[in-house]
Image (cartoon, grey):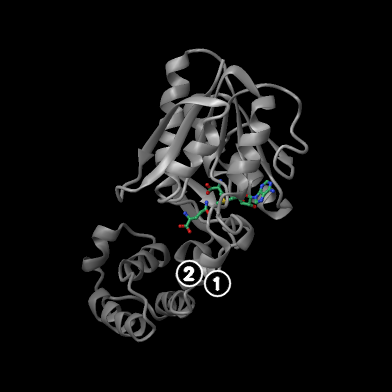
Amino acid sequence: MNYFDLRKKIEEQFKQNGIDELADIDWIMVEVLGIKRSMLPFVKEISGKDQEKIMSAVQKRVKHIPLDYIFGKSYFYGYEFKVDRNVLIPRQDTEILVENIVKDIKSKNKPVKVLDIGTGSGAIIVTIKKETNAECYAVDVSKKALEIAKYNAEQNNAKVEFIESNLFENVPKIKFDYIVSNPPYIESDVISTLQAEVRLNEPILALDGGVDGLDFYRKIINQSTDYLTSSGKIYFEIGYNQAEIVKNLLENDYSQIQVYKDYGGNDRVIVAQIKK
Ligand code: SAM
Ligand code: GLN
């Protein structure tokens, strides 16, 4: 069977199961056939064995399992990260958080220390290490997530100190130039309304930000001042509707607050510098 015929057959299955991401069909084929997407239209004959592999992935995808969990990997900022259901799949919007902090660190032209809270797959801190060579620390409360993050740091040749910790609990008493976090920020009640791919597959521990979604911002902001240098900064990813309220939470101890938007035009990143 050629590419077009197999794609048509799979498209039917996607549609019957309410899966709208038809591009995933191509990505499954790219992964199994080991070729570039642009080459797919030229594939005249897909072997029985490859068809089986493709259909096995399709069977999982139509059960709403995200592609990255099916193949166990994700791409973030051009780096490859292993993922499984113990870690959130790194989001493209999170690259904006990383892009801004990387730019900031580079402009300093001096050694800095960075702490990532709730590191998950390690996508944020491993990328910061690769792009800036800052001294990097990261915590997560999930042992299983930390195992994945450590693996990803090793695979990407990035030296990061990982610490199993409930927020700052086990963080060494040193001062960081930057604290960065993409904490769980979904309101508890909203989780059941998320798409099945997220709701049924991604770890609840990575999503649930408490009743108003702000639990982690409150806790991190409260404790952060003990861990920052006198000109230290905090970088958060935030939910699309949280900029104003997180700004309010920051205003006591922080100034120079800035908000950045994501690729969809929603507020997604907030940055603040500790008050002198
Ligand atoms: N940093 C990753 C990213 O951006 O793709 C993952 C972010 S995910 C939204 C939030 C992470 O916070 C999860 O890995 C979760 O295990 C971790 N987490 C939840 N509660 C925590 C706590 N009390 N202390 C430390 N980490 C926590
Ligand atoms: N961006 C994730 C989502 O859309 C949420 C991640 C988080 O809570 N930090 O599901």
- Label 1 CA crowd tier, 10 Å (few <14, some 14–19, many 20+): some
- For image coordinates 48% across by 61% down, the residue present is 68
198 is higher (above) or lower (below) than 223:
below
- Label 2 CA crowd tier, 10 Å (few <14, some 14–19, many 20+): some
Query: Where the C terminus falls, by quadrant?
Result: top right
In what element is the residue under mark 1? loop
Q: Which numbered circle lies on residue 200?
A: 1
- Left or right, 51 with respect to 230, comes to left
Count of numbered labels shown in the rendering: 2
Residue at mark 2 to residue at mark 1: CA–CA distance: 6 Å
Closer-to-camera residue (206/75): 206
Is the distance from the Cβ of mark 2 to the nearest ligand 2 atom less than 8 Å? no
210 is higher (above) or lower (below) than 162:
below
Whether residue 77 can be seen here: no
Residue, far top: 110
- Report x, y in % for residue 86: 63, 59
In what element is the residue under mark 2? helix
- Report x, y in % for residue 116: 60, 37
- Report x, y in % for residue 144: 70, 55
Whether residue 248 can be seen here: yes
- Report x, y in % for residue 46: 33, 75
Q: Amino acid at mark 2?
A: Glu
Pointer 2 residue: 197
